[in-house]
Amino acid sequence: MKDNQAKYPQLRFKGFTGPWEKHSLDEITTKTKSYSLSRDVERDHETGYRYIHYGDIHTGVADIVTEHTNLPNIEPANYDELRVNDLVVADASEDYQGIAEPAVVVGLPTQHLVAGLHTIALRPSSASSLYLYYLLHTESFKHFGYQTGTGLKVFGISWSNLSKFTFMIPSRPEQEKIVKLIESVDNLTSDNQRKLAKLKELKQGYLQKLFPQNGSKFPQLRFAGFADAWEERRLKDVVEKQIKGKAQFEKLAPGEVEYLDTSRLNGGQAILTNGLKDVTLDDILILWDGSKAGTVYHGFEGVLGSTLKAYRTSANSKFVYQYLKRHQDNIYNNYRTPNIPHVQKDFLNVFTISVPVSDEQEKIGSFFKQLDDTIDLHQRKLEKLQELKKGYLQKMFV
């Protein structure tokens, strides 16, 4: 049974039944020339020569390299150059997860392309380059990198070690099928990332225009029917009640009330406890202590953890939340104590807020709530696609 598991993937396309063959990386690739070219060789004008620096692999600038990939220009010289279908692997990383992070050349963005600092360039001889690219993203390869990588602060891997990586590989037609499927997930993921980025950019634009700026009493953009000046108030004037979180998770038992801490507020799993519910969906939550002290949240109900406070407002809570979110960096920079950060005690008394009439508050709050819901929907879709790819990498490779 173990032999079968080693030779066959968990998930397979119809029509493919033969066993996979075992190979090492040096059996199906040839190492080609890379150069210790660092950032000081880069030029800000077009030279016709570009390079792949290991840092650009880690940041995703060099990933699946095409004719349209914007890589740094370098001075011309007599280099051994990369070709279409070559792989370029980063041989250094700040963490083990990034060891041997790959890029693959599927198109040349310039006439001359070179492998630069801390890279290992590989030319496949008997395998799909994109198949190998995805193979180097699997957990089995990451585990191999973790075991063979060396270093304390900067981790590295040599070709002599990388070449020993052994794996099972199917026929070329099956490789191409696998590549096509994962590429389709990658393309959907990229589309959703672009849509999500545009939505977030759109929200930032509306935050700038639907709230007054630089002491003005009028925003740039308004809903029809509203023309009155906004009033400047202290935050305390629109907060009816301040609730200090007191719950300590280790003292709670299982129950039906959500325990609210930073993990949960930042997308973590809900934990139900026997705590007494002290905040509702309309309350604004603010992290009071820690490196991210001053971060505001909205739309949660449950028992409040001890590093949080909640504001129950007389003004529209969705509006107040968006106003605070609009000024999130201002809160971080000007309303926290130094050293070990926490929100300053007189925050309610000194933070000012511009407030329109209640109907306009409702319009603005509801508008941003709908926009946030759309952003959350795209974020969840993106996460599902990322999980889908992770599943394919686990089940379609041996």
Image (cartoon, rainbow, N blue to C red):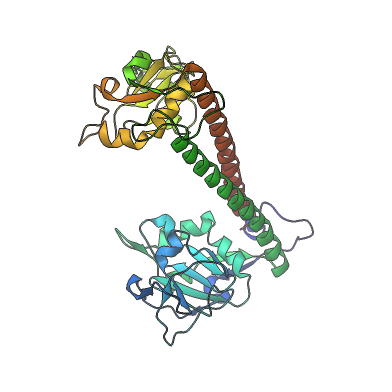
* Drawn side of residue 30 relative to residue 243, left or right: right
> Which residue is at the front of the view, 380 or 268?
380
| Residue 296, horizontal then vertical, whole percent | 39, 29
Q: Quadrant of the C terminus?
A: bottom right
Where 383 falls versus 17 (above or below)? Answer: above
Q: Residue 181 appears at what percent x and percent y?
A: 68, 56
Q: Is residue 89 left or right of residue 378?
A: left
x, y percent for residue 285 = 40, 23
Q: Please identify the quarter of the rendering in which residue 169 is found.
A: bottom right
Residue 394 visible within the image: no
Q: Tell me the residue at 60%/66% (across/down).
A: 130
Q: Is residue 176 above or below residue 361?
A: below
Question: Which residue is the extreme one toward the bottom?
Answer: 78
Residue at (29, 20) in percent of width and height: 348
Could you tell whether 136 is left or right of 208 in the image?
Answer: right
How many numbered callouts?
Answer: 0
Residue 144 in sight: yes
Q: Position of residue 16 (x, y in %)?
A: 76, 61
Q: Is residue 222 left or right of residue 128?
A: left
**Nearer to the camera, 206 or 334:** 206
Q: From this viewpoint, which residue is outermost toward the left?
A: 339
Quick one: 21 or 366, which is closer to the camera?
A: 366
